[in-house]
């Protein structure tokens, strides 16, 4: 298995600011992903974080709003830019290896 | 993109066997079926994965009929700690973006 650590675990932010979430995996994974989960809802895939290149975004998510980096096989960041209250959610980092997804505990973001 | 359909919720009692069925009518030849469990305030956790027939591990069994258009997750003798949301995902092992989460099944286990 793989252990995924996310920082921060939670934060309260002001409207219009940006926040970067860090994700560290304790072992190599083939792919890394970022999901968003609203309270009581399922997970929605934001993007696939590609090592050394631009992330691949799902419909409804754009790079300007959610810039993602993945400088190596075990680390990735997601930035939520120019936040609004609608961005309040749990953001989850995931690593994939051999068809299995490993998840972090998530970062709970509240935007005031 | 194979879509999955699960019951929104299920109720059970401690010690009972729980079977959660997932429909995936347009599963592709290369697709595997994977089940995840999610507790509140935690990320999903892998339970079991299979391609056809039956797979069993220390926590669950997965039954997949020959046509693979559905699958059933079986949890033997559930306990209160099995109360969680269970997600059925379908996708090939190389294309992780096809592992799209559906709405999941909220299982409530009562004493």
Image (tube, rainbow, N blue to C red):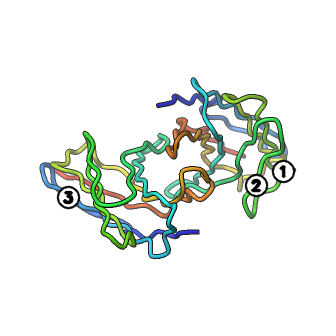
Judging from the image, mark 2 belongs to the subunit labelled A
Left or right, A92 with respect to B16, comes to right
Q: Are marks 2 and 1 on the same chain?
A: yes
Q: Residue furthest bottom?
A: B25
Give the percent coordinates (x, y) of residue A64. Answer: 87, 50
Give the percent coordinates (x, y) of residue A7. Answer: 64, 28
Residue located beneath label 3 in the image? B12
Q: Are marks 1 and 3 on the same chain?
A: no
Residue located beneath label 1 in the image? A63
The residue at 38%/69% (across/down) is: B68
Question: Which quarter of the figure has residue B67?
Answer: bottom left
Alpha carbon separation for disc pair 3 and 2? 39 Å
Crowd rating for badge 2 (residues with CA inside 10 Å; few <14, some 14–19, many 20+): some
Alpha carbon separation for disc pair 1 and 3? 44 Å
Secondary structure, mark 3, is strand
* B46 over A57 or under it: above or below: above
Give the percent coordinates (x, y) of residue A27. Answer: 58, 25
The residue at 82%/35% (across/down) is: A52
Name the foreground residue: B41 vs B86.
Answer: B86
Residue located beneath label 2 in the image? A57
Alpha carbon separation for disc pair 2 and 1? 7 Å
């Amino acid at each position: 298995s793989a252990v995924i650590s996310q920082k921060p675990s939670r934060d309260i932010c002001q409207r219009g600011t940006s926040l970067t979430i860090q994700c560290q995996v304790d072992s190599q994974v083939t792919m890394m992903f970022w999901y968003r989960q609203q309270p009581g809802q399922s997970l929605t895939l934001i993007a696939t974080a590609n090592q050394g290149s631009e992330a691949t975004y799902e419909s409804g998510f754009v790079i300007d709003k959610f810039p993602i980096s993945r400088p190596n096989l075990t680390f990735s960041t997601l930035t939520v830019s120019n936040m609004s209250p609608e961005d309040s959610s749990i953001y989850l980092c995931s690593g994939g290896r051999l068809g299995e997804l490993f998840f972090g505990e998530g970062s709970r973001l509240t935007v005031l | 993109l194979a879509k999955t359909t699960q019951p929104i919720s299920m109720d059970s009692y401690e010690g009972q066997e729980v079977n959660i069925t997932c429909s995936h009518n347009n599963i592709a030849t290369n697709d595997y079926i994977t089940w995840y469990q999610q507790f509140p305030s935690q990320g999903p956790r892998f339970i079991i994965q299979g391609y056809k027939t039956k797979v069993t591990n220390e926590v669950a069994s997965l039954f997949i009929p020959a046509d693979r258009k559905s699958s059933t997750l079986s949890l033997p003798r559930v306990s209160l700690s099995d109360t969680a949301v269970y997600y059925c995902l379908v996708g090939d092992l190389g294309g992780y973006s096809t592992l799209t989460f559906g709405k999941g099944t909220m299982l409530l286990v009562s004493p």
